């Protein structure tokens, strides 16, 4: 009689999800606009997002073109233009659940205009979106905006990226 080794009921999808010290993250990474796929390997996106998490999360990250970003911004925020990142948060407790939508052409144009590394800009916007999903805000209160920017700087420094606001 051969015995099989018991298997766990569920296993993390990636090694990054198993590392101690950081919250777990279930991630769906989608590329409707694939121009930057090589710049955003799954393990990097997971690392960047997990550094921004205060607890477990389930995120869908979708990289889109201008048309899709503009339609989402218009339909959900009444702003008829493509923006760099949109955060759609659905739940906060016990697990943060959100969609982060990044517009590849806008992200690329912003990075070029500011003389920033494109990967660093993506990392910043993913951290920014993850903080929004957890309730951080910068639009209503200047003091909150300063706290959020300080937190973004701290996270990005931990990840080895330069200050995005410098």
Image: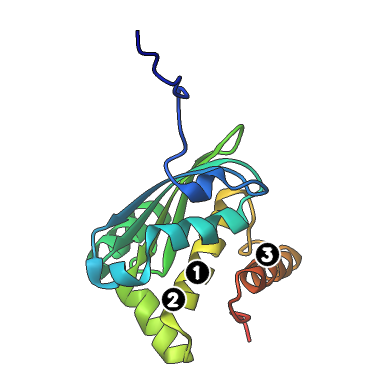
Q: Label 3, label 1: how many angstroms apart (C-alpha)?
A: 15 Å
- 151 with respect to 14 (left or right): right
On residue 14, the disc is none
Packing grade of label 1 (10 A; few <14, some 14-19, many >=20) is many
Q: Which residue is mark 1?
A: 123
- 141 with respect to 105 (left or right): right
The numbered mark, 3 or 1, whose residue comes first in the sequence reads 1
Residue 121 drawn at (x, y percent): 48, 76
Q: Label 2, label 1: how many angstroms apart (C-alpha)?
A: 6 Å
Above or below: residue 115 compared with residue 69: below
Q: Label 3, label 2: how many angstroms apart (C-alpha)?
A: 21 Å
Residue 163 drawn at (x, y percent): 63, 80
Residue 6 drawn at (x, y percent): 45, 19
Q: Residue at x 64, y 55 (%)?
A: 136
Q: Nearer the viewer, residue 124 or 132?
A: 124
Above or below: residue 92 compared with residue 99: above
On-image quarter of the N terminus: top left
Disc 3 secondary structure class: helix
Q: Residue at x 35, y 13 (%)?
A: 2
Q: Quadrant of residue 57?
A: top right
Above or below: residue 18 compared with residue 10: below
On residue 119, the disc is 2
Q: Residue at x 46, y 33 (%)?
A: 11
The reply to whether the C-beta atoms of the residues labelled 3 and 1 are less than 8 Å apart is no
On-image quarter of the C terminus: bottom right
Q: Which residue is mark 3?
A: 148
Return the residue found at the far front.
Answer: 1
Q: Nearer the viewer, residue 105 or 46?
A: 46
Disc 1 secondary structure class: helix
Packing grade of label 2 (10 A; few <14, some 14-19, many >=20) is some
Q: Quadrant of residue 64?
A: bottom left
């Amino acid at each position: 009689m051969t015995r099989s080794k018991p298997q766990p009921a569920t296993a993390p999808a990636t090694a990054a999800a198993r590392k101690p010290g950081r919250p777990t993250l279930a991630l769906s990474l989608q590329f409707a606009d694939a121009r930057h796929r090589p710049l955003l390997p799954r393990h990097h996106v997971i690392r960047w997002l997990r550094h921004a998490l205060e607890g477990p999360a389930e995120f869908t990250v979708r990289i889109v073109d201008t048309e899709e970003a503009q339609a989402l911004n218009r339909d959900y925020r009444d702003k008829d233009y493509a923006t760099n990142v949109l955060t759609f948060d659905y739940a906060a407790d016990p697990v943060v659940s959100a969609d982060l939508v990044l517009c590849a052409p806008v992200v690329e144009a912003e990075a070029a205009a500011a003389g920033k590394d494109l990967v660093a800009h993506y990392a910043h916007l993913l951290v920014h979106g993850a903080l929004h999903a957890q309730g951080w805000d910068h639009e209503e209160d200047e003091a909150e905006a300063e706290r959020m920017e300080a937190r973004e700087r701290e996270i990005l420094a931990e990840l080895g990226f330069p200050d995005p606001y410098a």
